């Protein structure tokens, strides 16, 4: 889904839409524009399941390996923007869904390689100087882990619903 804005938006809003499109490209594995869209002091604000401090992730040099590590267990990735992006001043927000196939390598996962996985999340990014400077995210990591059998879902180990999705 493209997040191309209507042509009636102010130029700074159009720029924010374009930045978010490039941001989504990062999560699809395309890092060509990372230095163009991320401030050198870019900082992540995220509640992490392992309790580590997300604030230690600063700048593209720290963020991109984390994206690579996250995406290493998935293939056939499709990232869809479900809502937004919504631009308000220097903030850009969106809800997205990631669909992929499990390629293996996640500790404690019991799902076979090739298992379809789908989970959603929200992004809020602050723009400064034409680049993203801060990132707040809330991702349904538990849904993804349950689908891979790494944790118990509400309907039993690795099952989120009777259909397994």
Image (cartoon, helix red, strand yellow):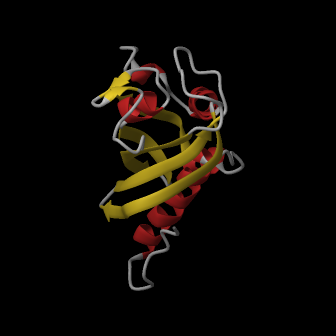
Q: Which of 160 and 122 is in front in this view?
A: 160
Q: Position of residue 88 (x, y in %)?
A: 28, 61
Task: For the C terminus, give its image quadrant.
Answer: top left
State left or right for residue 80 relative to residue 136: right
Rendered position, 70 above or below 163 = above
Residue at x 47% of width, y 65% of height: 17
Q: Where is residue 84 in the image (x, y as percent from the top left)?
A: 37, 64
State left or right for residue 43 relative to residue 45: right
Q: In which quarter of the image is residue 44?
A: top left
Q: Where is residue 69 in the image (x, y as percent from the top left)?
A: 62, 27
Rendered position, 126 above or below 160 = below
Q: Where is residue 129 in the image (x, y as percent from the top left)?
A: 48, 52
The residue at the far front in this view is 162
Q: Nearer the viewer, residue 163 or 125?
A: 163
Numbered-mark total: 0
Q: Would you say residue 47 is visible in this rendering?
A: no
Q: Nearer the viewer, residue 160 or 54?
A: 160
Q: Would you say residue 96 is visible in this rendering?
A: yes
Residue at x 36% of width, y 14% of height: 51
């Amino acid at each position: 889904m493209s997040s191309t804005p209507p042509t009636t938006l102010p130029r700074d809003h159009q720029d924010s839409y374009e930045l978010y499109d490039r941001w989504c490209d990062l999560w699809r594995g395309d890092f060509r524009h990372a230095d163009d869209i991320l401030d050198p002091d870019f900082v992540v604000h995220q509640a992490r399941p392992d309790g580590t401090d997300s604030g230690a992730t600063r700048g593209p040099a720290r963020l991109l390996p984390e994206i690579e590590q996250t995406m290493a267990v998935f293939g056939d990735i499709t990232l869809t923007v479900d809502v937004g992006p919504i631009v308000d001043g220097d903030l850009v927000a969106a809800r997205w869904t990631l669909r992929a196939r499990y390629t293996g390598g996640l500790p404690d996962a019991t799902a076979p390689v090739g298992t379809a996985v789908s989970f959603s999340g929200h992004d809020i990014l602050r723009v400064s100087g034409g680049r993203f400077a801060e990132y707040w995210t809330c991702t349904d990591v538990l849904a993804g882990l349950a689908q891979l059998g790494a944790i118990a879902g509400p309907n039993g180990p690795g099952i989120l619903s009777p259909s397994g999705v």
